[in-house]
Amino acid sequence: MTTIHPILRSSFAGVLLLLAAACTKNFRDYNTNPNGATQQMLQDDNLATGVFFSQMEQNVFPTAQQPAFGDEMYQEVQNLAGDVYSGYMGASDNWFGGANNTTYSMTPSWYGQAFGRAFLGVMPAWLSIKRNVGTDPSLRHIYALAQIIKVESIHRTTDMYGPLPYFKFGSGSLTTPYDAQQDIYSSFFDDLDSAIAVLTDYVSRNPNSKPLANYDLIYGGDYVKWIKFANSLKLRLAMRLAYANPSLAQKNAEEAVGNSYGVFTSNADNAFLQSADGVNIHNPLQIICFNFNDIRMGANMESFLNGYKDPRIGYLFNKAPDGKYHGIRNGISITNISAYTTPFSTLNVASTSSIPWMSAAEIYFLRAEGAVRGWNMQGTAQSLYETGIQTHFTDLGAGSASAYILDSTSKPAVYVDPANAGNNVNSGATLSTVTIHWKEGDPLETRLERILTQKWLSVYPDGQEAWSEYRRTRYPKVFPVVVNNSGGLINTATQIRRLPFPQSEYQSNSAGVQSGVSQLGGPDNGGTKLWWDKKP
Amino acid sequence: MKLTVVLLLVGLLSASARTMSQTVTFTGRNVSLGKVFKAIETQTGYSIFANKGLLKDVKPVTIAARNMPVADFLETVLRDQPIGYEIQSHTIFIKEKPAPSAPAAAAIPSPPIPPPVTITGTVTGADGLPLQGATVSVKGAHTVVTTDEKGRFTLEAGAGETLLVSFVGYQTRTVQVKGRTSIDIVLEKMQAELNEVVVTALGIKRQVKALTYNVQEVDGAEVNKVKDANFVNSLNGKVAGVTINSSSSGIGGSARVVMRGAKSLFGNNNALYVVDGVPLPDLSSTQPGDVFSGAGASGDGISNINPEDIASISVLTGPAAAALYGSQAANGVILITTKKGAAGRLNISVSNNSSFFSPFVLPKFQNRYGSDPGSYTSWGDSLATPSTYKPADFFQTGTNLTNTLSLSTGTDKNQTYFSAASVNATGIIPNNKLTRYNFNARNTSSFLDDKLNLDLSLMYIDGQEQNMLSQGQYFNALIPVYLFPRGDDIRKYQVYERYDPTRNFKTQFWPFGDEGFQMQNPYWIVNRDFFNNDKKRYVFSTALKYNIAPWLNITGRAKLDNNNTVAEKKYDASTSGLFASPAGAYYNNNATTQQLYADVLLNVNKTFFHDYSLVANLGSSYLDTRFSSIGYGGNLLSVPNLFNFANVNPALATPTQDGYHDQIQSVFGSVELGYRNSLFINATGRNDWASALVNTTARSIFYPSVGASAVLSELLGFHSHTFSFVKVRGSYSEVGNPPQRFVTIESYPIIGGFPSTSSYLPATGLQPERTKSYEAGLNFKFLRNTLSLDLTAYQSSTYNQLFNPALAPSTGYGSFYINAGEVSNKGIEAALGVNEHFGRLGWNATATLSLNRNKIVKLLTNYTDKTTGQTVSVDSLSVGGTGSYMEALVKGGSIGDIYVTTLQADGHGYIDVGSVTQSVTAAPNTYIKAGNASPRYNIGFRNSFDYRNFNLSFLVLARIGGVGVSITQAIMDGFGVSQASAIAREQGGALINGYRIPAESYYSVVGGGVAGVGSRYVYSATNVRLGEASFGYNFPASFFHKKIQGISISAVGRNLFMFYNKAPFDPESTANTGTYYQGIDYFMQPSLRSIGFNVKVQF
């Protein structure tokens, strides 16, 4: 009469144990993502203050890899926008039946990506650094560096779109109003000035200290180089306003050049991104050109380099199978892709090639332009121009440029498309006639064209910067598109002036983007000029 | 917590360790009866109850017994005693010895009544499953016994007497004893009987009339009649309130099963699958949500179950039915009861199903206009002779050969079921293959005179999937096939690789390039780019039940489900550079999901005061899920086509690691009170402690439900032949959902070895999502149960939604988590059944109707930002799309609303036509609502006719309402390969504003795909089809002189014919079995029309 009781008892004990032992103390562990670092972990080695520099630097030119994104990101942000609009490179593919960015049928999934890199890649990392630095005066130098990289990133972004949701970024609000490009630019100067002051002060107190050596992929934490970078960037930004606000431009340009650390003067100052500190960076252009088979030398590059008998051509591009250099013109109709991949010149780029941000050569050309405009650039236009050319030759390892500099007859060559004669450029207003050798007596526009053309050659492969300078100055002369699928929104002759705001902003920040459109002062399409795009 | 489970199992197993016998071994001389009884109790586990008064006259006994059955032993010791006994279940009642029969009997001269013999046997249903609680009585006598859990009974009857066997829901049978001592009885189901029992939550069987919510049962045979490799597709149209869309990934793909409308804006909306009372892990793979992905798809966990193992399926469409399963069951439950062995002779059945597949719906192509040389578009001149190119020729006839062997045997105490099945299928796209082997062994046994029941089962599944394609641009051979230039000859490219002297091996031949669609030679794609999934899954489960008393039992269950999937991708050298280096590419990902479930459940089932019944359950469960995956891969560095990690370029490799650990601990209980078996009230409660609730405002989630049901026909006494049965029912329930794991604890993903900022705004103060729902129903049976009508109306409101809206990039985050949003669903489920015989012709028909109206009541309303104090409201949100097609959540709209881009038009609606270009312009940021991807109504109409041994059945499926967007058609138009583009050319252009503009320039704008104009490609998703048909014949055992038990053969077909469909694709096919990315065709693999044969032999 009792045998069932132990069984009943043990069974009930089981139930009760389950009821009582709802022990949830491991739940915190379970619910902590094992695939990421916690805030706690970031306190170790003071990671929180430095570690996000890597993220910022890998998003200025998007080079981070999966799971963040792949080489397609660089292709969409940089290559199928600035790189082709600047005439540097030509697309050897015909995405979406030829209706894509290259033919001015703007592709939403491409033109929105640069926006994301700035606001999902650079700015959150900047904000994290800002928050981690807080009000601690001893960490102001870290924030100063973050400010410089932020300006470097956002000026590229505003040069694509114009107004941006910038000042109110990170307010925690779900919708962010846009700011006018004019205001964004003036904040750049303030931010750079303040960063330069903070870093100058820090360097004077701690001459050999490199607190961010482990995280800075550009200069290994060398603040002196960063001060020069900030000055050089200030000069670049000042020059961008040469037509929109000449006095502000001159003031900032002279300040930058006159700063005690000054601007870039030698290739040792150059800023570029490459593998460092265990971060493995490869050059996406190599993948885009050789794996994707999507990009080749641009027709303009062929025309200038061939026409100038430029010794740099082999350092920048590879010969086509016929032993010559052939570039692809942009905005053409490609029906047979294989006719454009194999017979044209690939880029001379390796997986390990560094990704240039800014070079001493560009700075010399900026100073040359300032000198032409009558600003105090600590040198004559001619000397700065010629030093710029030689500095670029040296950077490439192309030897002496003295003979090249003296060439006063070579002109850009006619362009012949071996696959389709309809794309040839034999003569006309779009084929430049500018020569290399400096002539002080040439008209202002000729001197500007000469400087801008050589700068264009030296800034390669940063097509984004080259496209911005083309829009600002109209130099060098970039061949217009042959096929214009914009439906009349973009004028073939004046070419594309900007990228439309991303679709995601229309979907999730509708009021914000509408404020951006009104500040833009024109419809949100590729034909509307930016604020600084004021050359008559 | 682990300790608890071990304790639990030990506690339950300790009972089984002391296995009791039902025989007695006892030797003694003049021992007291008390000692003898003690020995019986110790040895058999029986309890002996005796009134002390009865024992006062007993004498000591002398006995020597060895392994004597307890009844015989008792008979012997009590032979000379003044007392008798009676055994009921596991209890021996000592009682007065019955008075000797009246001597008068001897006085009547009549043939001698044969002495009663003990008869044992089993009662089973036609499906071989034992029937517990069936009554077996001797006709004209008072002997009545009921069957135990194994369907067994023991009674005494004369050799010439007749037994009456009855069970609720089954036709009563009379069986003549004819001197037998072992009789196995099979009962036929009574059609549309009122006292049906169905399996409900936690595997608990309930009377249908007691249910306060809608439960629909589908017989296992019904999903095997016209078999699909994923049996879930066979449920379509057979249950009301469920929308089933099969994946476009072909044979063995997943199914999207949404019950009573999508409720959660950002959570899972698919039904939960429960096998034998235990929830299954989800095991669904990532679903394509953009224009690129869709290659290398994989079937989910449920799709690899062997349909032959299914005994029955209960579909619980509403949350009330599922309240006992907690958060997992908020979207309804599909309960699967698997087969187990039955006592009796060895039953073997062997079946074969051979199916042949072809594309069901294809877009319409043109072959009148050719292409310019080298161009991939077909905007060339009119061809002198139409091109003979037929895209449909690319498809092959798919086949599926399924062979199943199942075996069932057993004794009273031990039953065994075993099955083995093989699925060998090839899809309509060459090299798409599915191979699956299922093994299932199950043993059920009882001990301690059936007080203790042990159920052990082991399931092993070995599956291989190769190149399952659902849609998308990557590795989709359909894109180059559909768009192939009509002026060219496809045969040139069928030799897809050619010798490359510079590389010294054959490389891909494809002069066209990728055309912006990552196009490759279609024959290369199917022959040289492989996606292989190798799945190994074992499921071990055990259940132990102890019957404490006839009305009280305790059950403990444990189930370990371990699934390992190795997914490999191998791209041969000279695959497009987007995917591989010149040497090729290789990826390998190894993912393991391990789920441990354990529960204990105390069940009470008691009748008292004659009219009242109580069914109560109290239990606790533990669910622990661990997932881990590691992967590595990338472009190959040097040796072409050596697919090995050592050959992967380390600089470009992507190592991946992922993992999580979730745990839910729960207690739950339910009470059902019945009055006169016709009025029932019911309440359930469950409390979940979930690991994902850490850092939320809730420590646990409580789910209550209440309900009532009344059989009016009996209560009000109007039961008649016309109104056989009328029942009303109603219920209310609340279920909840914890937030997504990890989101409440901020973490920084590591990218390239460095932490980077989180992609979502840190979630603070989250609450669990809740769904409140009401349902009311009516169940009618008319005309002696010939006609039945089940009606359910429901309303649910899901609020505190765990909102994860995408943020604009300008916020710095991709998304954020917040409680907001409210979604309501209301609808009607109706099922009408007919069951009639006209002589030898039997007719059985069911019509189901599902109607659901979904409404987004609010999204984010007046959310006050903690950092800024700013008040924000969000009334619309994009949840993904392709550019020209977008799914968006809009306040006042519905989940599944589709928005599309338009053409630029003026204020009067006239489409802008460029004066020079003579073309139209897309307005990429102007979206208009196209409609909703969900149907307005779903109707299923199933008919089955039996005549002698012939059977004919068919199923018509109708879906009314909803829209879909075909980007496939758009891009085909853009390339000039569609019939529409040819017609426009013949008619002199596309008609815009009443004028014709050049077809090519028009279609190059609207047919741009992602950059095109979605509004031009919206199609009604309404369709009516012949969903299933079968015609078969059963050869009875007599045909074979009983050498075999029977053979049934049938011809079957699925998706045979569209009565109505205006879309250029099958609107019921979906690339994404999740919530969003519905109603879009982006080069989806066509759905399959299948025709085949079934043969089943029973030995």
Image (cartoon, grey):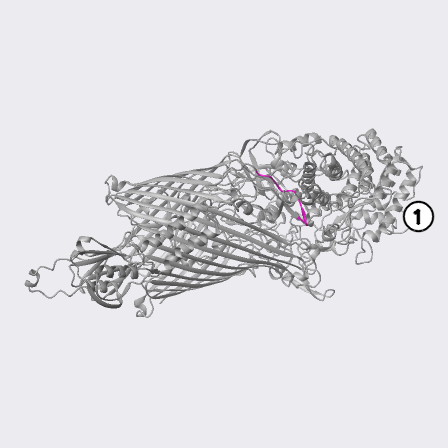
Please check the rendered image and state whether residue B762 is part of the magenta-colored stretch, yes or no: yes
**Residue that appears at 93% across and 48% down:** A402
How many other residues sit within 10 Å of disc 1, few (<14), some (14-19) or many (≥20)? few
Q: Does residue B317 show up?
A: no
* Left or right: B284, with B97 as reference point: right
Badge 1 sits on which subunit? Answer: A
Is residue B347 in view? yes
Residue B522, quarter of the rendered image: bottom right
In this view, B211 is above or below A318: above
Amino acid at pointer 1: Ser
Q: Identify the residue position indicated by label 1 in the image.
A: A402
Q: Which residues are magenta?
A: B751-763
Residue B23, position in %: x, y?
Answer: 28, 64
Does residue A470 appear left or right of residue B943 in this picture?
right
Q: Residue B956: percent from the left, percent from the top? A: 41, 50
Chief secondary structure of the magenta span? loop
Residue A513 is left or right of residue B691, and the answer is right
Drawn side of residue B687 relative to residue B186, left or right: right
Quarter of the image for residue B541 reads bottom left
Any magenta on residue A241? no
Q: Between residues B973 and B1048, which one lies in front from this camera angle? A: B1048
Q: Is residue A284 above or below residue B356?
A: above
Query: Considering the numbered disc 1 on the image, is that residue within a helix, a strand or a loop?
Result: helix
Residue nearer the viewer, A168 or A115: A168
